Amino acid sequence: MCIGIPMQVTAVEPGHAVCEGRGERRRVNTALVGDVAPGDWLLVFLSDARECIDAARASEVNATLDLVLGAMQGDVLSGDAGFELPSRMSAEQLRQLAGP
């Protein structure tokens, strides 16, 4: 299984972007997402950007990854996850999440 990591573009090179996220810095291939600019958010799988996302979606993915990491470390989950799970979304919200 491959997990996407939200990363923010800090610099752009032809066909690549230097990104930071979750405590690391990577040079990622941007062929699948096209032109990007510093400040943009990308969902990165290994060394490839697969999707352009907004800051809110980056926050949701980071919150989810924090929950997974906590569960792997044996943390007891309690309280609000900080985002709405798809199982609790309306049909319209799911359509917006899935895109066109």
Image (cartoon, rainbow, N blue to C red):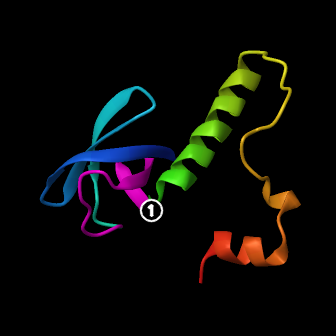
Q: Using the image as rendered, state which of residue 84 and residue 19 is in the foreground.
A: 84
Q: Residue at 86% x, 26% y: name it.
A: 78
> Label 1 amino acid?
Glu
User: The N terminus is located in which quarter?
Assistant: top right
- State the residue position of label 1: 51
Residue lying at the far top in this picture: please name it: 74
- In percent of width and height, residue 27 lies at 25, 42
Q: In the shown orientation, is residue 33 left or right of residue 58?
A: left
- Locate the C terminus and report the quarter of the image it occupies: bottom right
Look at 36% across and 28% down and name the residue there: 24
Task: Say if 51 sits above or below 19 in the image.
Answer: below
Q: Which residues are magenta?
A: 33-51
Across and down, in percent, residue 20 comes to: 34, 37
Describe residue 53's horizontal placement relative to residue 57 as left or right. Answer: left
The reply to whether residue 2 is in sight is no
Nearest the viewer among 72 and 84 is 84
**Mark 1 residue crowding within 10 angstroms, few (<14) / some (14–19) / many (20+):** some
Kindly state the secondary structure of the residue where label 1 is placed.
strand
